[in-house]
Image (cartoon, grey):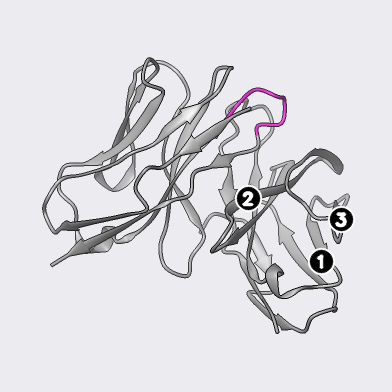
Amino acid sequence: DSGVTQTPKHLITATGQRVTLRCSPRSGDLSVYWYQQSLDQGLQFLIQYYNGEERAKGNILERFSAQQFPDLHSELNLSSLELGDSALYFCASSPPGTPYNEQFFGPGTRLTVL
Amino acid sequence: AQSVTQLDSQVPVFEEAPVELRCNYSSSVSVYLFWYVQYPNQGLQLLLKYLSGSTLVKGINGFEAEFNKSQTSFHLRKPSVHISDTAEYFCAVSGGSGTYKYIFGTGTRLKVLA
């Protein structure tokens, strides 16, 4: 158990809908990262937050957005869902003050868009 | 820009045989290198990391990796594999650009045969 929690574990929805994925980082970790894992794209970095502020953006679609709240949990919002958005979404967290940035991954949320 | 190449998408090996999973990286700055393992239907677990210092890094479950700067490689090895090592293995690079996000390779599926 990495200490990072993600809810829900599974999510099944229809095209055009909107969903929210939630992540709670390890206690004391200030950084949260979101990744998407799909069969055709592999593991792709989406976005990073550090202590409530957006720090870096990767291959995140405009239909997707995220935020990190004062209690440091983070939410990833996916809207106007398409079949191709079906994937495993991982959240990871890392502690402050470590330049090498070891990341601890949650168990993931499996999103299925029908 | 940084990139990671895992040359082998699948590696079958018999139980108790040695294995090497290859990883090559590209970066114009100093990097930190990681190997993660993903068991079926689970999140990613850190196997080992190279930050600096000794180029031979030992990790969990009997795995080790060697950082070779001249060949820009970070190959993962295990002298004797077990059935339980069957999993997907990801090499990742981090460093520079101030964000320390991970760039993952496409993964290598290790299948240990009885």
Magenta-span inclusion, residue A98: no
Badge 1 amino acid: Leu
Q: CA distance from mark 2 to mark 1?
A: 15 Å
Residue B55, position as x, y percentages in the image:
34, 20
**Which of the two labelled residues, at mark 3 and mark 2, occupies the earlier sequence position?**
2
Residue at figure coordinates x 86%, y 44% from the top left: A52
Q: Would you name the residue on which mark 1 appears?
A: A78
Residue B79, position as x, y percentages in the image:
16, 42
Where's the C terminus of chain A, which quadrant? bottom right
Q: Secondary structure at mark 3?
A: loop
Residue at figure coordinates x 39%, y 36% from the top left: B23
- The disc numbered 3 marks a residue on which chain? A
Q: Main secondary structure of the magenta part?
A: loop
Q: CA distance from mark 3 to mark 2?
A: 15 Å
Label at residue B61: none
Q: Would you name the residue on which mark 3 appears?
A: A62
A63 shown above or below B62:
below
Q: CA distance from mark 1 to mark 3?
A: 9 Å
Q: Nearer the viewer, residue B107 or A104?
A: B107
Residue B101, position as x, y percentages in the image:
65, 37
